[in-house]
Structures are given as structure tokens and as C-alpha cells.
Image: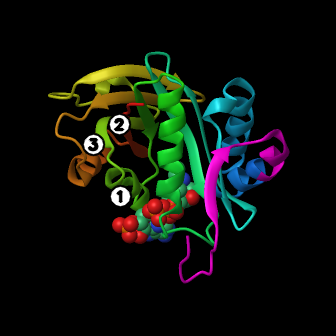
């Protein structure tokens, strides 16, 4: 593969133990320390779902995940070194993760997306929005206007966050996302995407 950045060879394969430290460094840089910790935990439990992107012999991206508790796999994290983003390598890595998940017998891939262009990244790769995850600091369900919303799950995060998963029957909608944010006084509304996969 070649592009203006001068790449001559790019490919994806399972993360090897020898690549793990570099992969964790990449995850820490672009996904934060919690991303690196998640990679190490997921690699230990599900190495078949940890995929490395190599460009010209150097580790340039990583995608990793774990079972979602039903029949799907959760993509916990994906990142491409910012020297190589916006040239299709993330899509290549995502497709390889989906293939690994399908090979392992999972029937769909789901994930919580970052905002902005990251939502576009998943949409262009065939994902559909299934839910919103709404984080409400000091939230109290009794005092929220939840009329007409289908609340699927409710959790509490330390110290005082109420987290509601709300169905997205209309699919991806930036307008609904921002309306939810205002109406529920949320600190963050994250889009939960899903894609069926086959072997
Ligand atoms: C998300 C990410 C993995 C995508 O990798 P990538 O190699 O850029 O992916 P692609 O090139 O296949 O697609 C990216 C799309 O977003 C667009 N885009 C817009 N702004 C962008 C930006 N600042 N950086 C990257 N892509 C951007 C690209 O143009 C492209 O869309 P297009 O094909 O319609 O032009 C990568 O950008 C990344 O590592 N981001 C930081 C970590 C992150 O947010 N991970 C996702 C957590 S849910």
C-alpha cells in the first residue's frame, strides 16, 4: 500500500507478546492510561481479539476487545498513530478486528464511540447506532425528565454519576444526542454502535 506519506507496506495480524509493550504505549498515548490498562487486561484474557497494524515494519495501530456477555464482542479500543491517521488504516484495522471476532464465533461487534469524526469513522464502516450512554453527574432518576425515552439499563459510577443507556430507535442523530445532553444535564453522551458480522 502506498500514499503520499510514503508508506510501502501495511498489514494487520494478531498482537504478539513481543509487540505488547509498544502496543500499550500507543494505547496510552492516544486512548489514555485507562486504554493501555484495558489493552493489557484484554490481551491477557482474549489475545485472539488483539490486532496490530504494522506500517513499514513498525507498530502503528492496535485494536482490542472482549466478549460482551451475550453473543457479541466489544471493541474496547482502537487507535492508529496520528502520523498515519485519515488514510484508511483505521478502517483496515477495524475490518481485521471484525474478522477475528467472526472467526472466534461472535455474531456482532459493539462499541462506545468517541465524539466528532470518530462517529463518522464507525458509520462509514457500516456501524449503526443502537443506544446512547448518558453520564449524569449527581443524577437522580426521580428528578429527570425521561418521558418518551426507553431506558434500557441504569448503573451508578463512583463517585456520583448516574449512567443511563437509552435506546436510539431513530439511529444516529447528532440533534437527538445534543437534546439528550441538555435535557438530562449530562456531562457526556456517548453513541453505542453495533454491527452484525459473519465469517
Ligand atoms: C479513530 C481512528 C482509529 C481512525 O483511524 P484512521 O486511520 O484515521 O481511520 P480512516 O482513515 O479509515 O477513517 C477516518 C475517517 O475520519 C475522518 N477524519 C476527520 N478528522 C479526522 C482526524 N482528525 N483524524 C483522523 N480522521 C479524521 C477521515 O477523513 C476519515 O473519513 P473519510 O474516509 O470519509 O475521509 C484514529 O483516528 C485514532 O486513532 N483516533 C484517536 C483514538 C480514538 O479516538 N480512537 C477511537 C476510540 S472510540
Query: Residue 181: horizontal and vertical position, in percent?
Result: 32, 46
Query: Residue 189: horizontal and vertical position, in percent?
Result: 38, 44
Q: To which residue does mark 2 refer?
A: 195
* Number of marks in the rendered image: 3
Query: Residue 180: horizontal and vertical position, in percent?
Result: 27, 42
Which of the 4 image quarters holds residue 153? top left
| Local secondary structure at mark 3 | helix
Q: Is residue 153 among what the camera can see?
A: yes
Tell me the CA gap for discs 3 and 2.
23 Å
Front residue of 3/133: it is 3
Answer left or right for 69 relative to 128. right
Tell me the CA gap for discs 2 and 1.
14 Å
Q: To which residue does mark 1 refer?
A: 120
Front residue of 154/65: it is 65
Residue 199 versus residue 186 in the image, above or below: above
**Disc 1, ligand 1: is the CB inside 8 Å?**
yes
Label 2 vs 1, first from the N-terminus = 1
Residue drawn at the location 80% of the way across and 48% of the way down: 19
Numbered label attached to residue 180: 3
Question: Which residue extends farthest bottom?
Answer: 4
Front residue of 111/187: it is 111
Please rate how many residues cluster around mark 2, counting C-alpha atoms within 10 Å: few if below 14, some from 14 to 19, many from 20.
some
Magenta span: 1-22
Q: Are marks 3 and 2 in contact (CB under 8 Å)?
A: no
Amino acid at each position: 500500500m502506498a500514499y503520499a506519506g510514503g508508506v510501502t507496506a501495511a498489514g494487520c495480524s494478531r498482537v504478539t507478546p513481543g509487540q505488547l509493550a509498544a502496543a500499550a504505549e500507543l494505547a496510552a498515548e492516544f486512548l489514555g492510561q485507562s486504554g493501555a490498562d484495558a489493552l493489557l487486561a484484554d490481551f491477557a484474557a482474549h489475545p485472539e481479539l488483539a490486532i496490530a497494524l504494522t506500517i513499514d515494519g513498525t507498530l502503528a495501530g492496535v485494536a482490542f476487545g472482549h466478549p460482551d456477555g451475550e453473543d457479541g464482542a466489544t471493541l474496547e479500543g482502537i487507535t492508529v498513530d496520528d502520523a498515519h491517521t485519515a488514510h484508511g488504516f483505521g478502517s483496515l484495522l477495524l475490518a481485521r478486528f471484525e474478522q477475528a471476532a467472526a472467526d472466534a464465533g461472535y455474531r456482532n461487534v459493539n462499541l462506545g464511540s468517541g465524539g466528532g469524526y470518530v462517529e463518522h469513522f464507525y458509520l462509514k464502516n457500516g456501524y449503526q447506532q443502537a443506544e446512547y450512554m448518558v453520564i449524569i453527574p449527581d443524577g437522580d432518576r426521580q428528578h429527570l425528565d425521561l418521558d418518551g425515552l426507553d431506558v434500557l439499563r441504569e448503573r451508578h459510577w463512583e463517585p456520583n454519576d448516574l449512567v443511563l443507556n437509552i435506546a436510539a430507535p431513530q439511529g444516529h442523530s447528532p440533534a437527538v444526542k445534543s437534546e439528550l445532553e441538555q435535557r438530562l444535564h449530562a456531562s457526556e453522551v456517548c453513541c453505542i454502535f453495533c454491527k452484525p458480522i459473519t465469517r
